[in-house]
Image (spheres, grey):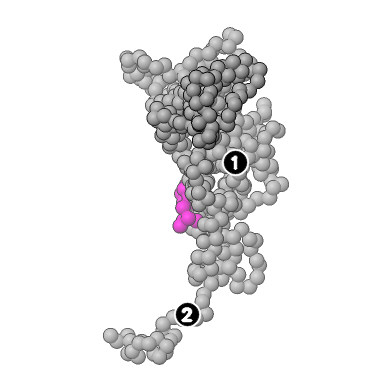
């Protein structure tokens, strides 16, 4: 198959932009996607909007509690996975009910719970999760390595590696990688294939070199926006630094204005004297300028070109926010009402962060737990613990108490209270005032007696 693919793609025209950079460190050549350096230095480290969005998404995602469970109903777990792929307030009750009927939380003393709580000696689970997601948000992909020692008997620790330091080799299908290497100290260290997971965005630009295996950074789709945003910031900094104040000095009162005529040279003399004072005294740094009458300063503000620069910066910021599905009110706090901010932070948690958490959950359950031998376990994040979603939890609890298809304990589950082992707590709630129509007499039902007998 490899020979067929080579023949098929071998005659293709060369790309104008090479998909890789080649970096020679010592005697080792490291190959990585060409834009990785741009994503880091021009994006995350060089653009305040990109840095702010990535930091907020990764930090907020790491605040959501993670819990390890044992699966008590094997068939129900697939149903729970399906209905928990996205978050909606209307589907919250169904999702929680399915989860409570499918999963049982394991104690913190469980060996696999301890591994997930402290993936490696340097990081807690929240810190590890933040590192993994930050790499993915910057570069489009995040390599994760499970250390199993020489015996391969168990997983001892899990690490998030820097994306530019990991090199992948495509397998024959081109849809996955067959080998991976870590560049460390100028050396390429082979990594066992089964101990490496690459969490990434989809990159549909599939090619025989395998650059698509590294994922597609959101910044790749917005490189022009990113470049224009950086240039805009540099221009504004230059404008404020070099342009200085732009306005007019005027006498403070009409008497001062009349006195200006007595100054040698009149108004022109005042201007010349003031310019000279500013040039001589401020320029040399010896003292502050002074004049023999009080003056007001009238600022001219920004001209049309400068206003266009600011408007252009706002449009570029919107474009960058779209790359990461980031709510705009969080980028312009000075113009956001409290209600807009609360809605924006709720959107960030329940939409933007939620999608990244689902991908992270799939990595833990589809790769790490099976690799560690944790059969029958399931790791999940508990979005209902987040303060941003408490209004949805409150609405759900109010709805459940009015619904006659749930039990008291199911209501307590939704509110995160422990179940009570008391009589009737696991029976559906039925209003005492409601009866089947067959048990009502004609006066109570307010219908004709023959209707109870089945006649029309």
Q: Magenta part of the protein: which range?
A: 80-92
Above or below, comparing residue 277 to residue 95 in the picture: above
Q: Is residue 326 visible?
A: yes
Q: Secondary structure at mark 2?
A: loop
Residue tagged 1: 62
View extreme (top): residue: 27
Residue tagged 2: 434
Question: Residue 61, percent across and down?
Answer: 56, 42
Q: Could you give the CA–CA distance between mark 2 and mark 1, rounded to whole angstroms?
A: 47 Å
Q: Is residue 274 magenta?
A: no
Considering the whole magenta stretch, tell me its main secondary structure. Answer: helix
Above or below, comparing residue 110 to residue 20 in the picture: below
Above or below, comparing residue 88 to residue 235 in the picture: below
Neighbor class of circle 2 (other Cα within 10 Å; few <14, some 14-19, many 20+) is: few
Neighbor class of circle 1 (other Cα within 10 Å; few <14, some 14-19, many 20+) is: many
Q: Write the residue at 42% across / 31% down.
A: 307
Question: Residue 410, percent across and down?
Answer: 56, 63
Q: Write the residue at 43% across / 25% down.
A: 228
Q: Is residue 195 visible?
A: no
The front one of 11 and 374 is 11
Q: Write the residue at 39% across / 22% down.
A: 207
The front one of 285 and 319 is 285
Q: Is residue 83 magenta?
A: yes
Q: Write the residue at 36% across / 15% down.
A: 16
Q: Which labelled disc corresponds to residue 189?
A: none
Above or below, comparing residue 393 to residue 64 in the picture: below
View extreme (front): residue: 262
View extreme (left): residue: 456
Question: Residue 73, percent across and down?
Answer: 54, 54
- Of pointers 2 and 1, the one earlier in the residue sequence: 1
Question: Foreground mark, 2 or 1?
Answer: 1
Q: Secondary structure at mark 1?
A: helix
């Amino acid at each position: 198959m490899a020979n067929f693919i080579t023949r098929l793609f071998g005659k293709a025209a060369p790309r104008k932009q090479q998909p890789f950079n080649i970096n020679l460190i010592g005697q080792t050549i490291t190959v990585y996607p060409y834009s990785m350096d741009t994503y880091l230095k021009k994006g995350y480290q060089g653009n305040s909007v990109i840095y702010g969005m990535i930091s907020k998404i990764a930090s907020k995602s790491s605040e959501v509690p993670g819990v390890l469970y044992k699966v008590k109903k094997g068939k129900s777990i697939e149903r729970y996975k399906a209905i928990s792929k996205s978050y909606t307030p209307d589907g919250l009750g169904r999702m929680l009910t399915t989860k409570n009927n499918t999963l049982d939380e394991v104690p913190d003393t469980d060996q696999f719970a301890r591994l997930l709580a402290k993936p490696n000696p340097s990081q807690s689970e929240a810190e590890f999760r933040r590192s993994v997601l930050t790499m993915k948000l910057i570069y489009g992909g995040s390599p994760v390595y499970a250390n199993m020692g020489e015996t391969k008997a168990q997983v001892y620790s899990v690490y998030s590696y820097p994306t530019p330091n990991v090199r992948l080799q495509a397998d024959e299908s081109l849809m996955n990688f067959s080998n991976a290497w870590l560049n460390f100290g100028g050396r390429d260290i082979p990594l066992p294939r089964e101990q490496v997971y690459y969490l990434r965005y989809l990159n549909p630009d599939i090619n025989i070199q395998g650059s698509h295996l590294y994922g597609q950074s959101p910044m790749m789709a917005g490189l022009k926006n990113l470049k224009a945003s950086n240039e805009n910031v540099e221009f504004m900094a230059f404008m404020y630094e070099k342009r200085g104040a732009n306005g007019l000095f005027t006498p403070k009162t009409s008497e001062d204005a009349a006195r200006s005529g007595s100054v040698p040279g009149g108004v022109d003399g005042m201007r010349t004297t003031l310019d000279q004072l500013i040039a001589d005294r401020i320029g040399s740094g010896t003292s502050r300028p002074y004049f023999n009458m009080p003056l007001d300063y009238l600022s001219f503000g920004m001209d049309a070109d400068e206003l266009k620069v600011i408007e252009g910066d706002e449009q570029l910021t919107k474009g960058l926010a779209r790359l990461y599905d980031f709510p705009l009110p969080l980028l312009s706090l000075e113009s956001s009402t409290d209600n807009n901010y609360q809605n924006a932070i709720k959107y960030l948690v329940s939409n933007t962060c939620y999608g990244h958490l689902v991908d992270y959950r799939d990595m833990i359950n589809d790769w790490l737990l099976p690799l560690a031998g944790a059969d029958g376990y399931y790791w999940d994040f508990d979005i209902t613990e987040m303060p941003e979603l408490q209004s949805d939890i409150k609405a759900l609890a109010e709805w459940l108490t009015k619904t006659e298809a749930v039990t008291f304990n199911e209501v307590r589950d939704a509110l995160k209270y422990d179940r009570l082992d008391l009589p009737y707590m696991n029976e559906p709630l039925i209003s005492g005032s409601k009866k089947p129509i067959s048990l009502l007499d004609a006066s109570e039902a307010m219908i004709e007696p023959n209707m109870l007998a089945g006649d029309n």
